[in-house]
Amino acid sequence: MWQLWGVELLSVMLKNYFNARATHAIYCTFAFEFFNTMATIKFQFEDQKIESKIFTITKGESVLDIAMDENIGLHHNCGGVCGCSTCHIYIHQGMNSFQEISDREEDFIDRAINPKINSRLACQCVVENDLDMVVIIPDQTALNGH
Ligand code: FES
């Protein structure tokens, strides 16, 4: 009789042990996948006095949304409707994170200060892919009513 209870008890303990191990493994795998797939955006600044900042990103947000949420100084005079060029940025890494540039965006980039091949408008750069990106914010002191 005691031997049967002992076997039963041992059986339950082993089952709980392996269930706990399995649960732990599932949580660890989930946590690893979760943190490992979170893409980041790094803001660098032409103004050397401002330090770079890194944030995690969520699909569907624009670079302007992220900048505003994180108190990054970036002008956006038209309110983010592709009607000015004050949110002009340079995409140093991660250009494939965004939809292709539109003709309208290109027109406004042509009016920006010092446009380059990697220029974009932050309000038009909506994150579509989980890629790490690096964005350079032009010197904002040169902007007034652009
Ligand atoms: S805020 Fe005006 S074009 Fe982006």
Image: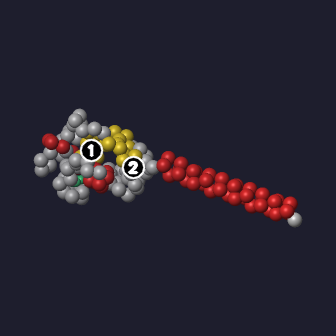
Q: Secondary structure at mark 2?
A: strand
Residue 144: x and y in percent read 12, 47
> Residue 15 vs residue 55: left or right?
right
Q: Nearer the viewer, residue 89 or 107?
A: 89
Q: Nearer the viewer, residue 125 or 69?
A: 69
Residue 133's place in the image compared with 82, above or below, is: above
Residue 10: x and y in percent read 78, 57
Residue at x-position 26% and y-position 53%: 68
Q: Amino acid at mark 1?
A: Ile
Residue at x-position 50% and y-position 52%: 34
Q: Secondary structure at mark 1?
A: strand
Mark 1 residue CB less than 8 A from any atom of ligand 1 = no
Q: Would you call the spot at circle 1 few (<14 residues within 10 Å), some (14-19), or many (20 or more)?
A: many
Q: Amino acid at mark 2?
A: Thr
Residue at x-position 81% and y-position 60%: 6
Residue 134's place in the image compared with 103, above or below, is: above
Q: Nearer the viewer, residue 17 or 68?
A: 17
Q: Mark 1 = which residue?
A: 89
Q: Which mark is residue 141?
A: none
Residue 80: x and y in percent read 24, 57
Furthest residue toward bottom? 1
Residue at x-position 62% and y-position 56%: 23
Q: Mark 2 = which residue?
A: 56
Q: Would you call the spot at circle 2 few (<14 residues within 10 Å), some (14-19), or many (20 or more)?
A: few
